[in-house]
Amino acid sequence: MADLPPEPTILGIKLAHLIAGAAGGLARSLTNPGGSIMRHITTAVVGTIVAGYGTPAAAAVTARYLGVPDIPVASMEGMVGFVLGLIGMSLCEALMRWARIWRDGPPPSLPPAPPRA
């Protein structure tokens, strides 16, 4: 059997993960109409970054969750990378909101409801 060439990487991240994330980020950006070209580029870049770093772990978790031993993790990486690219911007927006809330302290509690007669 012939030896397979090593998979191309950029800064230690598989190029296939980056491409899948960029495609997912671009698909998310194009499905939300309006916005500037910078918003589309930013969404694709964030999808690329999230997929690049998150695909190995997310593919392993997905394979274990599905419980299908016949599907190797490497076969799921493209699909998982695309999905992470799609949701990458939403994940980052949610994390930024959570960080702002955590930075500013807990929100004030609501006053107790008046007793019913």
Image: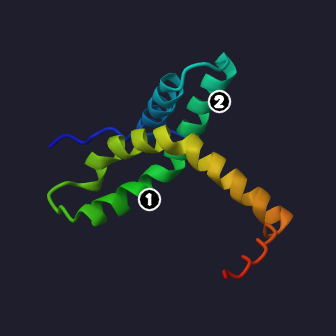
Quarter occupied by the C terminus: bottom right
Amino acid type shown at disc 2: Thr
Residue at label 1?
Answer: 57
In the image, 33: left or right of 117? left
Where does the image place residue 46, in percent across and percent down from the top left? Answer: 60, 38
Q: Which residue occupies the extreme front position in the image?
A: 117
Choose between 31 and 72: the one closer to the eye. Answer: 31
Give the camera-side residue of 17 and 92. 92
Q: Position of residue 85 (x, y in %)?
A: 48, 39
- Name the residue that disc number 2 marks: 42
Q: Is residue 110 visible?
A: yes
Q: Residue at x 14, y 58 (%)?
A: 70
Q: Are the residues at dot 2 and dot 1 in contact (C-beta closer than 8 Å)?
A: no
Q: Residues within 10 Å of mark 2 (few under 14, many from 20)?
A: some
Q: Position of residue 10 (x, y in %)?
A: 54, 38
The residue at the point 47 percent across, 25 percent down is 31
Up the image or down, 61 lies above or below 54; here it is below
In the structure shown, which secondary structural element does the residue marked by tag 1 occupy? helix
